[in-house]
Amino acid sequence: MNKTSLPSISLNSLEQINLGDNPFSCTCNQKWFFEWIKQTKVKIVGYPNRYKCRNSNELVGQFLKDYNPTDDICKPWNPLYTMAIVLSLFGVSILVIIICVWICQNNIKNTVHLLRVVYNHRQGHVAFDERLNYEYHAFAVYCGADREWVHNVFKVKRE
């Protein structure tokens, strides 16, 4: 039951109302109804014996007349809290992304370069300049016992 299902104009124009033995939800959403029961001149049939909380675990079986939600308990959620939480999470996320990009800057540049090379290769563009003369050098470390094999076998195969 909410405030729109039973407008106060309709409720106050009644002579009596019987809502007994219904499963009342004793939550802050029903605070308006509890306040209305306490102040109304309408005869409420079976009140308070047939009006009990049934949906809240801690309050099951408690009479509605004994349930008194205060303004401290039923504080409405401030939308500024939601905005502050969302903006804080957004700011932290942006900060983490900036730090990750800063730390991984060289890896990102290399990845972008390799993606461009792969893309250009698939498009049929080969980025190879035949005018350049490429020369490679290798250095082999070996012990004196392997000297003959390195010079006669290894070096011949590598050149």
Image: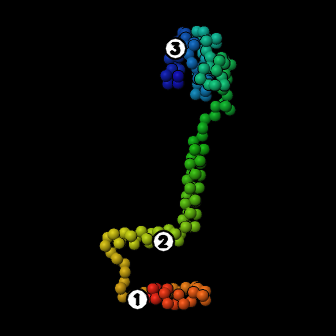
> In terms of secondary structure, where does tag 3 sit?
loop
Place of residue 54 in the rendered image (x, y in percent of width and height, measured from the top left): 60, 20
Asked whether the viewer can see residue 31, the reply is no
Q: Which residue is mark 3?
A: 13
Is tag 3's residue or tag 2's residue first in the polypeptide sequence? 3
Instruction: From this view, report whether residue 148 is shown above or below residue 79.
Output: below
> In terms of secondary structure, where does tag 1 sit?
loop
The crowding category of the residue bearing disc 1, from other C-alpha atoms within 10 Å (few below 14, some 14 to 19, many at least 20), is few
> Which amino acid, mark 3?
Ser
At x 33%, y 75%, the residue is 125
Nearer-the-camera pick, 102 or 31 = 102
Q: Is residue 66 left or right of residue 114?
A: right
Q: Please identify the quarter of the rendering in which residue 129 is found.
A: bottom left
> Which amino acid, mark 2?
Asn
Is tag 3's residue or tag 1's residue first in the polypeptide sequence? 3
**Distance of mark 3 from mark 2, alpha carbons?**
77 Å
Q: Which residue is mark 1?
A: 133
Q: Which residue is mark 2?
A: 110
The label nearer to you, 3 versus 2, is: 2
